[in-house]
Amino acid sequence: MLAQTSGLGGTGMPAQAGGIGGTGIVGIITGFASICVNGVEVHYDADTPVTDNGQPGQASALAVGQLVVVNAAGTGDQVQARRVALLHVAIGPLQAVNPATGTFQLLGQRGQASVATSLAGLQPNQWVRVSGQRDANGDIVATHVQAIAPQAQAQLLGTLAQVGKDQFTVTGTPVTIAQSSSAMGLAPGAEVLVHGTWTGERLNVTHTTQEPTTSALGAPTHVVLEGYIRSVHGNTIDIDHREMTLGPDTRVTSASANNGVAALARNQKVRISARMDAEHRIHVERIETQGARANRSEPSSSTDKDADSTKKTASAKDTESQSRTESTHTESSTRSGSDSASAGSPSTTSRTGESNDTGRTTGDTGNAGRSSGESKGPGRSDSKRDRGK
């Protein structure tokens, strides 16, 4: 049952009914006892509903490095999960893999493992389940890679784009949608989770879920999410195609005491604390930078470069446009202070905009490279829990 309300960030998509108020969290699992996501300790038990790419799942399947969407009761550093949705960015056969550099390709997607050794032993054509986030270029920053048995269908989570009449891509990968996109209510720019058969060049889609993150998030009053900055324009920041509003009191804090005044930049990883209004628009209260940006990875093979060219051209044009316009958003980068919003850390604070440095970042996810064998079920806890801040 879907509540007929606006979606996350004004997407217009309905949010899942139930779970009104409380906190919505979108991020990577960094520790256990409960689960730690975006610095928030999320308590759950065996009765907490868990889904795995939209299908019923089990809490015992949760592991460090996986991307989850949590709808929780309460606010602050400790909350109680109402439900947990595990979302994998891609499931399918590897096209290419280089454990030495941590780069890989699958389903026409380029990826970079946050810990290169997590790819050790993997071979082309081997099926994997990949969790992580997308950088500003749409490439996967993988924080959890798990080898699995071949599946009947591949799965891909990304942004829908139309490149011609009845021709679509999901974050650069060509897809064939059996049913009319208009009949399905699909619109370019929507987040979609698609299931289908991988031909080696395109995904023949048999099932589509629209806006899975929005649906899993529900209707919280507070939101904590992390991701890579795509752009900052005026009073709007875009994190993985989710537009959020910056206000005059939005605080930007550095993750390092020695980093000086923090500056927002394209492809920088950040953690957002925000409130959500009745129309599901997100108003940013605090932005914490999550470390340096990493070098952009190159494709580990030439496969699907042509299929990806439309996305890359658009990204380049967007970057050029940003460099001409984003300076209007930036106040003096020399303003600094000790903002109480980052209590417990000697961070510096500023209100700032985006520079036009477009380097790619690696995932800064603490122990994200730990294998899936370290997953913890309810009632199993670590004596020294890793809370990734």
Image: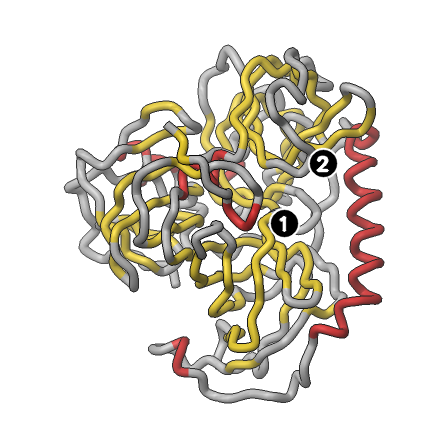
Residue 176 % position (x, y): 69, 16
Q: In which quadrant of the rendered view does residue 359 lie?
A: bottom right
Q: Amino acid at mark 1?
A: Asp
Q: Position of residue 26 (x, y in %)?
A: 44, 48
Q: Locate residue 114, reporting x and y percent.
A: 54, 48
Which quarter of the rendered picture does the N terminus lie within? Answer: top left
Is residue 134 placed above or below 46 in the rendered structure? below
Q: Residue at x 75, y 32 (%)?
A: 301
Q: Amino acid at mark 2?
A: Ser
Q: What element does badge 1 sit on?
A: loop
Is residue 112 depicted above or below 55 in this figure? below
Occupied quadrant, residue 23:
bottom left
Residue at mark 2: 300
SS at circle 2 = loop
Q: Nearer the viewer, residue 211 or 268?
A: 211
Residue 117, can we see it?
Answer: no
The residue to which callout 1 is attached is 135
